[in-house]
Amino acid sequence: MKITRMHGAGGKIMQDLIKNIILKNLEITSVNGGIGLESLDDSATIPIGDKEIVFTVDGHTVKPIFFPGGDIGRLAVSGTVNDLAVMGAKPLALSLSLIIPEGFNLEDLEKIIKSINETTKEAEVAIITGDTKVSDGVDDIIISTAGVGIVDRGKAIRDCGVKEGDAIIVSGNIGEHGLAILLSREGFDFETDIKSDVAPINKLIEKVLNEGIQINAMKDPTRGGLADALNEMAEKSNIGITIFEDKLPISEEVQSLCDILGLDPLTIANEGKVVMAVKKEDAERCLEILREHPLGKNAEIIGYATKEHKGVVMETIVGRRIVDMPIGDPIPRVC
């Protein structure tokens, strides 16, 4: 059996690779009782005194490296910052590792670095260390970023904490990043204004937490989209999630293009969204707070957690549909 791009596209195939090959052959342990690799959460933690250091790492091989709404530099910063933020942490600093193909255009490199700089300012994090390699063995630039954040001890938010009755909230329109990549890569002759949603969402999440909203679980729905994120949250929390088709925040343009191309917007990657499981009593207030922020203006309560069933079920106008974990994101190399 050989590795294919589907092994890196989120969803079931990637989960099987991680569990059956990678985790199976690693001696897995946590540090000081923190959250470790075995949890397969968005970040790990290291308790120190009354705080926990939150740590994550990302590799980015998006194609094309420049796309409507962003580029690989903005993606690298946003993806790492967001993995820290959905753990309830305050992102502090990033590392930056560049693997640059021989013959790469210097003007493009400078453009990417400037984009990285602008995005770190937006997120209010610092690049504090890095590494640069030039290789004749890669076909395009690869960026790896690691991130460090901090949270009060015991306050990290897990993706396994969904509780019965929790409201499930999505911070905005889904499917935009993956479609922006696909349309840019394949050159489809559609007149469209679709742009990637790529953005650091730490300030959006911080705004909700600062208002005392009880968030029981969070995840950023990247590869595999909302369907993958919801299934992971439901499985890890040993609970069911019911969502409502008419509550899903999907733009008409995204829905129309998905219909034409035979794609399910629930399985398409996002890079500037968060899905939250929020205590029912806090749900409406949480929605108000999200909508006050530019990145949360299209936020919606899309469903609730229940013990009536397992997995993810969607109520549609023609009945119930089971929303399975996707085999993988239908659009490869989106991040």
Image: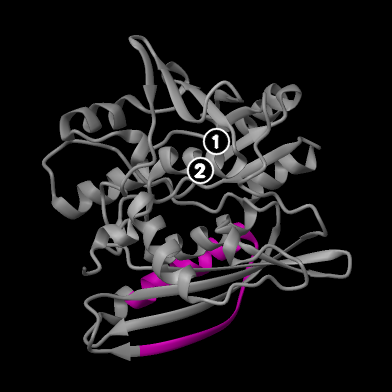
- Which quadrant: the N terminus? bottom left
Gap in Å between the C-alphas at discs 1 and 2?
6 Å
Helix, strand or loop under label 1: loop
Q: In this view, does 215 lie above or below 288?
A: below
- Where residue 164 appears, as percent x and y from the top left, is 67, 27
Decide which of tag 1 and tag 2 comes sooner along the chain. 1
Q: Can residue 114 be seen in this view?
A: no
Task: Give yes or no for residue 175 being in the magenta stretch.
Answer: no
Task: Using residue 247 as the reference point, say whether residue 108 is left or right of it.
Answer: left
Helix, strand or loop under label 2: loop
User: Quarter-wise, where is residue 285 in the image?
Assistant: top right
> Hey, what amino acid is under mark 2?
Lys
Point out the stretch of residues depicted in magenta. 109-133
Which residue is painted at 57% across and 20% down in the image? 308
Which of the two residues, 214 or 99, is positioned nearer the viewer here?
Answer: 214
Which residue is painted at 59% across and 72% down in the image? 28
Residue at which label 1 appears: 171
For the stretch drawn in magenta, the main secondary structure is: helix
Task: Using residue 124 as the reference point, say whether residue 181 is left or right of it.
Answer: left
User: Quarter-wise, where is residue 59 in the image?
Assistant: bottom left
Task: Using residue 143 as the reference point, say whether residue 264 is left or right of it.
Answer: left
Task: Give yes or no for residue 126 being in the magenta stretch.
Answer: yes
Residue at which label 2 appears: 273
> Hey, what amino acid is under mark 1?
Ser
- Which quadrant: the C terminus? bottom left
- Where residue 91 appears, as percent x and y from the top left, is 67, 62
Q: Is residue 127 above or below residue 217?
A: below
Alpha-carbon neighbours of circle 1 within 10 Å: few (<14), some, or many (≥20)?
Answer: many
Disc 1 + disc 2, Cβ < 8 Å: yes
- Where residue 304 appears, as percent x and y from the top left, is 59, 24
Alpha-carbon neighbours of circle 2 within 10 Å: few (<14), some, or many (≥20)?
Answer: many
